[in-house]
Amino acid sequence: MTIVIQGATLPNGTRTDLLVDGGVITATGSGVTANGATVIDATGLTALPGLVDLHTHLREPGFEQSETVLTGSRAAAIGGFTSVFAMANTSPVSDTAGVVEQVASLGARHGYVTVRPIGAVTVGLAGTALSEIGAMAGSRAGVRVFSDDGICVSDPLLMRRALEYVKTFDGVIAQHAQDPRLTEGAQMNEGALSSELGLAGWPAVAEESIIARDVLLAQHVGARLHICHLSTAGSVDVIRWAKARGIDVTAEVTPHHLLLTEQLVRGYDSRFKVNPPLRREEDVLALREALADGTIDIVATDHAPHPLEAKECAWDEAANGMVGLESALSVVQAAVVDTGYLNFEDVARVLSAKPAEIGRLAGYDTAFAVGSHANFTLYDPSVSREFGTEHLHGKSVNSPYLARTLPGRVIATIHDGYPTVLDGELVDPAEVAAAAEAARG
């Protein structure tokens, strides 16, 4: 498929045309043309490299009432993503080569995004024995990221062994940092507000203590460690200290932890119930500053869909989690671009290049250069919208941004050289699947 993008503004502010042919960018500059090409007018639009989410819950297999690989991929595409890493808490758990290959093949068949499975660290996420890490790494899925996300690998010896194992093939352990003993029954951030509301608190030290332990283990072993959904100012301090010591650790922050605070819990609206919980304003500001100075490496959504019955219930019975793929880029703009912490070159780094690097995902190291893979999104940062259920394209609607005005809109998404979103709308699934098959040759 041949596509001409006219007048796009690159992250560095320069304007150019782009010619896409055979899945790669074949020419750039002013006045690029090609006979029979699909032409997209990108005047006034910012071209970003395809977004990469290192932390997505697609739920399939086993929890298709919440999400499937297809519906999650469509949600990702409309949000500007071209690759997502699918967490392992499925049923059966993604702890064998067979399951991760199934997830990867479903993503390839549907074609909206590249789906890279994340393998479980422990068998059944039970925290007692290591999973088939080597088999998953050597499978057709080529797994390089392993996580029990949702559950902390709390046993220090097991964590050490996992770090030693993945080191042999340049893998990474992505830790959900939550001391289980310190957070039993926790319902929200621990502090004055939790006492006022009568809800059991989730203390910051439960996150910070696990991060401190694990960066020391990573240093001892000489392995790569990634910290999921960092949420406190104290965690930022630990990561900053570890990086100053040369420890090979990376960290992510979610869009919701960059924008929302614990004050939203006052209404007991379970859309705001998440793990780790929404924190104080001081934590939000510390996270923004850490993302700006590179202490935090990336933004990842932690897209966590749930059916209505899991959320429309009493606060203490409600499931943790928020959907976030469709809104991520807009929330990042609101939280750290419009507030002056980042520019769009920074956004390209924290939402594309760096997450791809951490996940060892090829093809994202050079963006918009001739010969590079054609994975990019065209984004209009000048518009705003009241975010509603009509903007959600997965199976679940547990978004914390409903009825909130958000900036920006994805106008087009190009994945492996073919469009998955055009004029702000998803391309038909049959067309995308056919294009994906043709791209595979």
Image: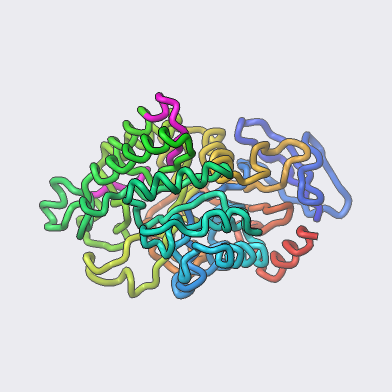
Q: As drawn, is 153 to the left or to the right of 428?
A: left
Image quadrant occupied by the N terminus: bottom right
Say which residue appears at 56% left-offset and 33% top-offset: 345
Q: In front here: 209 or 69?
A: 209
Image coords of residue 292 (percent x, y): 44, 31
Q: In front here: 334 or 213?
A: 213
Image coords of residue 336 (percent x, y): 43, 37
The reply to whether residue 432 is in sight is yes
Say which residue appears at 26% left-offset and 72% top-offset: 313
Image coords of residue 412 (percent x, y): 64, 53
Q: In front here: 107 or 217?
A: 217
Which span is picked out in magenta? 242-262
Image quadrant occupied by the C terminus: bottom right
**Relative to 103, residue 145 above or below:** above
Image coords of residue 396 (percent x, y): 44, 68
Residue 390 highlighted magenta (yes or no):
no
